[in-house]
Image (tube, rainbow, N blue to C red):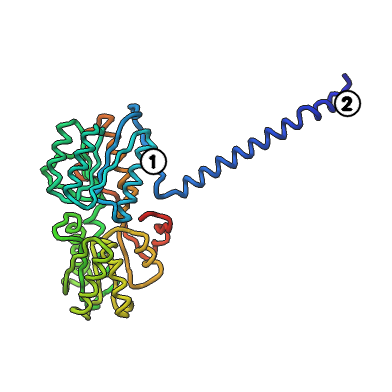
Amino acid sequence: MKAKNLKATFNKMFLPLLVIALFLNVVGCAEEIKTTQSSGNDTEDSGEIFNSKLDLTGKKIGYCTPSLNAPYYQALLQSIKSTTEKNGMEFISADGQNDINKQIAAVEDLITKGVDALLLNPKDPDALVGVTKMAKAAGIPVFILDSSINPSADFVTTIQSNNLANGELAGEWLVKKMGNKKMNIALLSGNAGNPVGKKRKQGLLQGITEEQLRTQGKIDLNIKTQAYTEWSYAGGLQAMEDILVAHPDINVVITESDVCVLGAIKAIKQAGKTNDILIVAGADGQKEAIKYIMETDFYGCTAMNSPVQIGKNAVKYAIEYINGKRDFDKTSFTAPLLITKANAAKYYNPKALF
């Protein structure tokens, strides 16, 4: 066959196939890039894969939340679910429905289902000690999340943000911001006796007093009043309305959690005092709080308590336990981080659950 005829035959038979192959390759690359970008932008529920010497197929992770009535609890559950399933395990959840008796029953049900690890966010530090002992008797390791439990409980480790260090960072920031200006402080707390709230409060007060001693050589801790909000928007609103009537000279509000003060902001706005009051939160980095920090001057700072990171860490430690690790610290912290106007945009995600 002549060279001219060979060239014609090639163009007729193979060029169309080459074009199709190139097209499919381009589409495949585009799809790969799209998937990577989607994964990279998915900060809320992408999960994370951890190394495991053992095959995790068929392993069950059980998680019991005190309730699902707050965005934080929803984000924490979603993080645990995504990370569990991404590592090839089965996720089983139970909701305490904000009732300690229901949470106890829910944990007992998870134990009966034979989970390989139990992740527990206790509503009460004492009431759930019994079910941790029940889990241990069944050979199920217990990991405490977010909150704390009585030390007499049987558990591997507690996974939470560093509430003391975060509170200290927020307290120090407040003193630097206010300088020598007289502070009339209102303290908004979650609920009485809560161990996490107490630690955050301790951090805030330590941060204030240590920074005052360091920079002013004295302590002027003028807390005019404290109110409990039950960790709710409505509770914060009611508490702040009462405080503004009883103590109209308040110029600083410190709080154990963003949620305690988000409702209070409505009362502050209605009283026309957004230019007179500075808000400082010892936790949590909730997206609504970060938005206020970015856009206003009355919400000064908050500290990061990431439900996404706590959820990932909890599943990681459960996998490590399944693989034979036993030398866990009794408390495992996420890194302390203060969010201010200078870095708020970096941590703001309007699509986040929390």
- Name the amino acid type tagged 2: Lys
**Gap in Å between the C-alphas at discs 1 and 2?**
59 Å
Between discs 1 and 2, the one toward the N terminus = 2
For this view, does 124 lie left or right of residue 84? Answer: left
Mark 1: few, some, or many residues within 10 Å (few <14, many ≥20)?
some
Vertical comparison of 247 with 341: above or below? below
Q: Disc 1 on helix, strand or loop?
A: loop
Give the x, y percent position of residue 28: 60, 37
Vertical comparison of 43 with 277: above or below? above
Residue drawn at x 26%, y 74% as measured from the top left: 179
Residue hosting label 1: 48
Residue hosting label 2: 4
Mark 2: few, some, or many residues within 10 Å (few <14, many ≥20)?
few
Vertical comparison of 21 with 152: above or below? above
Q: Nearer the viewer, residue 24 or 210?
A: 24
Give the x, y percent position of residue 61: 29, 36
Residue drawn at x 35%, y 42% as measured from the top left: 81
Q: Nearer the viewer, residue 333 or 12?
A: 12
Give the x, y percent position of residue 56: 34, 30
For this view, does 152 lie left or right of residue 268? Answer: left
Residue 10 in view here: yes
Q: Nearer the viewer, residue 101 or 19?
A: 101
Q: Disc 2 on helix, strand or loop?
A: helix
Quarter in which the C terminus is drawn: bottom left
Give the x, y percent position of residue 123: 19, 51
- Name the amino acid type tagged 1: Glu
Residue drawn at x 18%, y 49% as measured from the top left: 148
